[in-house]
Image (tube, rainbow, N blue to C red):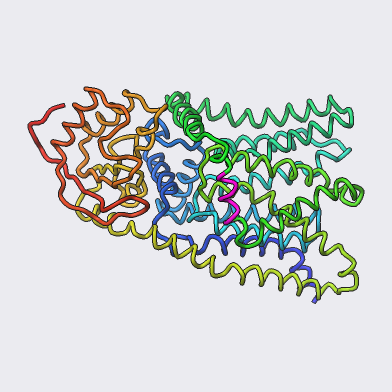
């Protein structure tokens, strides 16, 4: 009996992390959803092209930082091109995030708070993960790791090894090059550290800690700059991953536009109750700092980081003015901490003084069951909606594979790069989706001509107009004689041969154009 109890005590947290990760990821695995969402399809395509010797930005345009592309390339490499390899990396990443988060909250607030806080954020993740393999999903373990590295280091009087802060900076650097707006926790850590050290007149210690922190972050930055510099793609890297994102964010202006992501985010974050429990926990955290500081002294830095981080996260989410559900993944770690605070206050009350350990475990199990039961219908509906939407790609992928050869290039005019990936047909241009060519303030005549010349030179067998309202075929925001000349050439050489059912949020049926020889010249 004692041996069994020892095994349970040593493994329950790991088992919970693994089961929680499976709860989130199994319904969106390739076994359930074979195809991928729009963004994930781009990342898979770029990963596939990396394995074929191409370079992000220079050979395949996308505006995300580079980490996600190389994660997908690694996943495809370890599974011989199968998406199961990417799913495996997702599973390992999420399991690690759940385990570190569980350990972090348990160390501060006890096992009950850790279990319930972790269950809540994992259940909530289902409603914002959007079929998975997205940038903010991979920043979760980095966020929890940074909190775990610093929650005691800030208030610990003993000497913390320099690598502690160096590693924290490294995780921040990796997070930044995964998703630039996912650095809220690291900004909060720096702010809280400065306040702590200034209050205790430890200026020299603060300088040393910040030095190693920024050296870690800088090492990641320099590494990517050197990498793309040596590969000959540094200017394209800056142009796509930074310049475009500046324009993208600036295109949304106005207070109410910026506020919209916050109001829209309430729905998915509140579905399982995480936002409600965390909101109460945030207010309780403020009260604890002011009135019960001695009781929480052991985890006061963690609480301080969380109090600073929550508004920062929503500010960073609102920068783009967009309301995509997966943006809210970055706020899950701090919400789990404040949900843990709420449960800690509940279980610390005198109501539970005389309750046995067995009764507490049964109560925790009951609360977990209620959380799962209350969100079950929404859980199923969310999974089924994505499965139905994404698996619509099957028809067009099959049609392409049946009527073209692997050497043929296929152009999807719109934003459906996932079709290129799953049909294993290379795009004739680095602009595998054309949003940048329709973005005012970013696009110029040279880019459009580059795109058109590449299509003319590679003459893909099929040009498929996906009827995307944001990328109307041939109707660029810039029109010059040189551009019109090339458009006329394409219109002459590509004739419609049929239509196919649309997928995603496009309007009307897709039109398939096939290349034909002609006497037209650009």
- Quarter occupied by residue 410: top left
Identify the residue at image location x=44%, y=44%: 43
Front position in the image: 463 or 401: 463
Instruction: Determine whether, in the image, residue 518 is placed left or right of residue 346.
Output: left
Coordinates of residue 432 in the picture (x, y in percent): 34, 39
Q: Quadrant of the N terminus?
A: bottom right
Identify the residue at image location x=42%, y=52%: 37
Instruction: Determine whether, in the image, residue 381 is placed left or right of residue 290.
Output: left
Q: Which residues are magenta?
A: 260-268
Identify the residue at image location x=76%, y=60%: 113
- Quarter occupied by residue 413: top left
Asked if one can make out residue 407 in the rendered structure from this viewpoint, the answer is no
Q: Quadrant of the C terminus?
A: top left
Asked if one can make out residue 215 in the rendered structure from this viewpoint, the answer is yes
Residue found at the very far right of the displayed protein: 294
Residue found at the very far left of the displayed protein: 519
Residue 263 belongs to magenta span: yes
Q: Is residue 210 above or below residue 32?
A: above
Q: Is residue 30 above or below residue 151?
A: below
Residue 202 belongs to magenta span: no
Coordinates of residue 343 in the picture (x, y in percent): 77, 61
Coordinates of residue 78 in the picture (x, y in percent): 47, 50
- What is the number of callouts on the image? 0
- Quarter occupied by residue 513: top left
Identify the residue at image location x=86%, y=40%: 156
Q: Main secondary structure of the magenta part?
A: helix
Coordinates of residue 371 in the picture (x, y in percent): 65, 68
Q: Is residue 193 above or below residue 275?
A: above
């Amino acid at each position: 009996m004692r041996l069994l109890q020892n095994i349970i005590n040593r493994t329950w947290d790991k088992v919970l992390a693994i089961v929680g990760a499976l709860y989130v990821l199994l319904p969106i695995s390739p076994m359930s959803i074979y195809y991928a969402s729009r963004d994930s399809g781009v990342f898979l395509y770029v990963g596939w092209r990396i394995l074929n010797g191409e370079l992000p930005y220079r050979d395949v345009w996308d505006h995300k930082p580079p980490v996600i592309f190389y994660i997908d390339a690694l996943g495809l490499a370890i599974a011989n091109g199968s998406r199961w390899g990417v799913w495996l990396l997702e599973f390992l990443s999420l399991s690690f995030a759940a385990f570190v988060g569980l350990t972090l909250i348990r160390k501060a607030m006890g096992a009950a708070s850790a279990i319930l806080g972790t269950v809540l954020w994992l259940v909530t993740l289902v409603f914002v993960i959007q079929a998975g393999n997205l940038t903010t999903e991979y920043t979760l373990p980095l966020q929890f790791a940074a909190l775990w590295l610093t929650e005691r280091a800030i208030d610990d009087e003993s000497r913390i090894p320099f690598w502690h802060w160096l590693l924290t900076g490294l995780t921040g650097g990796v997070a930044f090059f995964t998703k630039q707006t996912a650095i809220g926790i690291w900004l909060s850590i720096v702010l809280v550290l400065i306040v702590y050290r200034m209050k205790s007149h430890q200026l020299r210690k603060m300088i040393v800690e910040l030095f190693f922190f920024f050296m870690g972050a800088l090492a990641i930055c320099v590494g990517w700059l050197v990498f793309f510099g040596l590969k000959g793609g540094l200017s394209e890297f800056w142009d796509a991953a930074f310049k475009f994102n500046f324009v993208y964010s600036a295109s949304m202006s106005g207070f109410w536009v910026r506020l919209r992501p916050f109001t829209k985010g309430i729905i998915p974050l509140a579905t399982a109750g995480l936002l409600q429990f965390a909101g109460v926990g945030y207010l309780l955290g403020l009260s604890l700092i002011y009135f019960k500081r001695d009781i929480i002294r052991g985890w006061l830095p963690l609480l301080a980081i969380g109090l600073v981080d929550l508004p920062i996260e929503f500010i960073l989410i609102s920068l783009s003015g967009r309301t995509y559900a997966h943006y809210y993944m970055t706020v899950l770690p701090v919400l789990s901490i404040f949900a843990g605070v709420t449960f800690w206050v509940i279980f610390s009350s005198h109501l539970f003084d005389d309750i046995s350990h067995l009764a507490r475990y049964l109560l925790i199990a009951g609360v977990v069951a209620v959380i799962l039961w209350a969100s079950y219908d929404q859980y199923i509906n969310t999974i089924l909606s994505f499965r139905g939407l994404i698996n619509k790609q099957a028809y067009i992928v099959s049609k392409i594979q049946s009527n073209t050869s692997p050497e043929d290039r296929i152009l999807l005019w719109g934003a459906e790069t996932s079709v290129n990936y799953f049909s294993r047909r290379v795009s004739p241009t680095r602009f595998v989706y054309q949003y940048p060519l329709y973005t005012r303030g970013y696009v110029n005549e040279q880019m459009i001509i580059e795109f058109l010349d590449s299509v003319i030179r590679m003459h893909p067998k099929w040009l498929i107009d996906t009827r995307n309202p944001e990328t109307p075929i041939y109707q660029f925001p810039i029109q010059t004689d040189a551009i019109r000349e090339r458009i006329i050439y394409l219109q002459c050489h590509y004739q419609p041969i049929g239509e196919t059912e649309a997928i995603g949020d496009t309007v009307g049926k897709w039109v398939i154009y096939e290349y034909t020889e002609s006497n037209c010249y650009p």
